[in-house]
Amino acid sequence: MERYNSKEWINNLKIAIINNDLSKIEKYSNRKIPKFSSIEEAKEALSFVEKAKNILQQEKNKIKLQMNRLKQSNQYNIVYNSYMNEWKC
């Protein structure tokens, strides 16, 4: 596992957030958070962690919506195919 000092970790997370790079947000979220040299640095890190959390929550909501649409589409297809099979005879 790579070791980062606190400034590097914050900057890497910040770049991932700016680029909306979900894989890097996840990567830095799963790493051990370094010790911060000051309260201000810890507050800055907390701010970026909250932003990352919001981005991941938005993505989760998008995926959930897409899954619901797929379920509805699948249900429609099942009903439609059943109806069409009845009328083929």
Image (tube, rainbow, N blue to C red):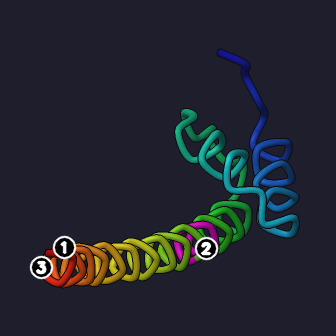
Question: Residue tagged by mark 3?
Answer: 86
- The image quadrant where one finds the C terminus is bottom left
| For residue 4, above or below residue 45 | above
**Numbered disc in front, either 1 or 2:** 1
SS of the residue under disc 1: helix
Coordinates of residue 44 in the picture (x, y in percent): 71, 69
Q: Which residue is mark 2?
A: 55
Dot 2 lies on which element?
helix
Q: Nearer the viewer, residue 51 or 21?
A: 21
Determine whether label 1 and label 3 are within 8 Å by CB.
Answer: yes
Q: How many C-alpha atoms fall within 10 Å of the one at disc 3: few (<14), some, or many (≥20)?
A: few
Range of magenta residues: 50-54
Q: Quadrant of residue 27?
A: top right
Disc 2 from disc 3: Cα separation: 47 Å
Image x and y of residue 46, in percent: 59, 67
Q: CA distance from mark 1 to mark 3?
A: 4 Å
Q: Earlier in the sequence, mark 1 or mark 2?
A: 2
Give residue 5's position: percent from left, percent from top.
78, 34
**Which residue does the image show at 36% across and 80% down from the upper left?**
73
Identify the residue position indicated by label 1 in the image: 85
Residue type marked 2: Ile
Q: Which mark is residue 47?
A: none
